[in-house]
Image (spheres, rainbow, N blue to C red):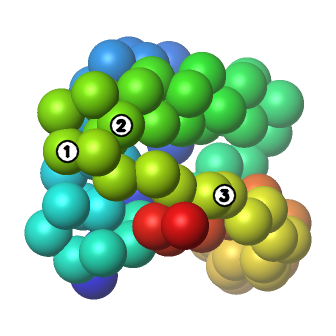
């Protein structure tokens, strides 16, 4: 399962669709964001994905946020990872 990487410029509805699709297919999704703008887009997309999954598939999900270290261009950055799983 791939990690859904979100930037500050990501379209909220596209990320929400990706989250919902991955949860439907794999039973869980992981969303990764670095920076305040990316985390903002991730949380808004998560809210949309929750409604998509509840309305269409009757799947209730929970989100567990975590810190994760990511290496980018030989530098370690701290990212936020949102683990989305059925309740």
* Left or right: where 70 falls relative to 56: right
Give the mark nearer the N terminus: 2 vs 3: 2
**Residue 1, percent from left and from top:** 27, 81
> Mark 2 and 1 residues: CB-CB less than 8 Å, in contact?
yes
**Residue 57, percent from left and from top:** 19, 44
* Left or right: where 66 falls relative to 53: right
**Residue 32, percent from left and from top:** 59, 58
Whether residue 54 is situated above or below residue 10 in the rendered picture: below
Q: Quadrant of residue 43?
A: top right
**Quarter of the figure that contains the C terminus:** bottom right
Mark 2 or 3, closer to the camera: 2
**Residue at 72 percent of width and 25 percent of height:** 40
**Residue at 30 percent of width and 75 percent of height:** 27
Residue 79: give its label.
none
Give the mark nearer the N terminus: 3 vs 1: 1
**Residue at 73 percent of width and 65 percent of height:** 64
Per the image, the residue denoted by label 2 is 54
Alpha-carbon span between mark 2 and mark 1 = 6 Å
Per the image, the residue denoted by label 3 is 63
* Left or right: where 9 falls relative to 69: left
Whether residue 35 is situated above or below residue 4 in the rendered picture: above
Mark 3 or 1, closer to the camera: 1
Q: Residues within 10 Å of mark 3 (few under 14, many from 20)?
A: some
Residue 57: give its label.
1
> Mark 3 and 1 residues: CB-CB less than 8 Å, in contact?
no
Q: Residues within 10 Å of mark 1 (few under 14, many from 20)?
A: few
């Amino acid at each position: 399962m791939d990690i859904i990487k979100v930037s500050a410029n990501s379209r909220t509805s596209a990320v929400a669709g990706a989250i919902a699709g991955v949860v439907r297919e794999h039973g869980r999704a992981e969303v990764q964001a670095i920076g305040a703008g990316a985390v903002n887009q991730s949380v808004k997309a998560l809210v949309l994905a929750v409604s998509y999954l509840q309305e269409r598939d009757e799947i209730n999900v929970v989100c567990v946020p975590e810190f994760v270290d990511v290496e980018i261009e030989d530098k370690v950055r701290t990212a936020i990872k949102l683990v989305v799983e059925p309740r």
